Amino acid sequence: MSKTALSVLSVIEVVALVAVLGGFLLAVAGGLRRIVSTLAEVTWGARAVERQLRAVPINIRMLNAGLTDAATVLPSLSNAVDSKTGRSTR
């Protein structure tokens, strides 16, 4: 083979290699775009959950206060009902 033919083949090989690498880079870029889109949705969902959970500590304190009140009142209420009905829980 002549030097010209070898040079042309070398140029064709380099162009083919660059084309293949470019195709793979485009495929990777497309995959990364899908990942970014998915992560954006996950971030949005996590922020929504965070906003919903901000009220939980306040509501837990209110619930605990109500349960404490109930725990204080129910034994005496139970004793009053027992004495009215003649029952004994003991």
Image (tube, helix red, strand yellow):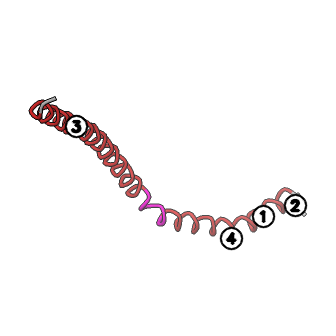
Mark toward the start of the polypeptide (3 vs 1): 3
* Disc 2 to disc 1, C-alpha distance: 12 Å
Q: Which of labels 2 and 1 is toward the front?
A: 2
Q: Secondary structure at mark 4?
A: helix
Upstream in sequence: badge 2 or badge 1: 1
* Mark 4 / mark 2, whichever is N-terminal: 4
- Over which residues does the magenta segment extend? 53-58
Quarter of the image for residue 69 reads bottom right
Disc 4 from disc 1: Cα separation: 14 Å
Secondary-structure class at tag 2: loop
Residue corresponding to mark 3: 17
Q: Nearer the viewer, mark 3 or mark 1?
A: 3
Q: Earlier in the sequence, mark 4 or mark 1?
A: 4
Q: Which residue is mark 1?
A: 80
Q: Nearer the viewer, mark 4 or mark 3?
A: 3
The correct choice, above or below, for 81 with respect to 42 in the image is below
Name the residue beneath numbered marker 4. 72
**Residue, x 71% and y 64% (percent of image)?**
74
Front one among 53 and 18: 18
Q: Is residue 51 magenta?
A: no
> 70 or 26: which is nearer to us?
26
Kindly identify the amino acid type of the residue bearing the numbered disc 3. Answer: Leu
Query: What x and y, as percent, mark residue 40?
Result: 31, 48
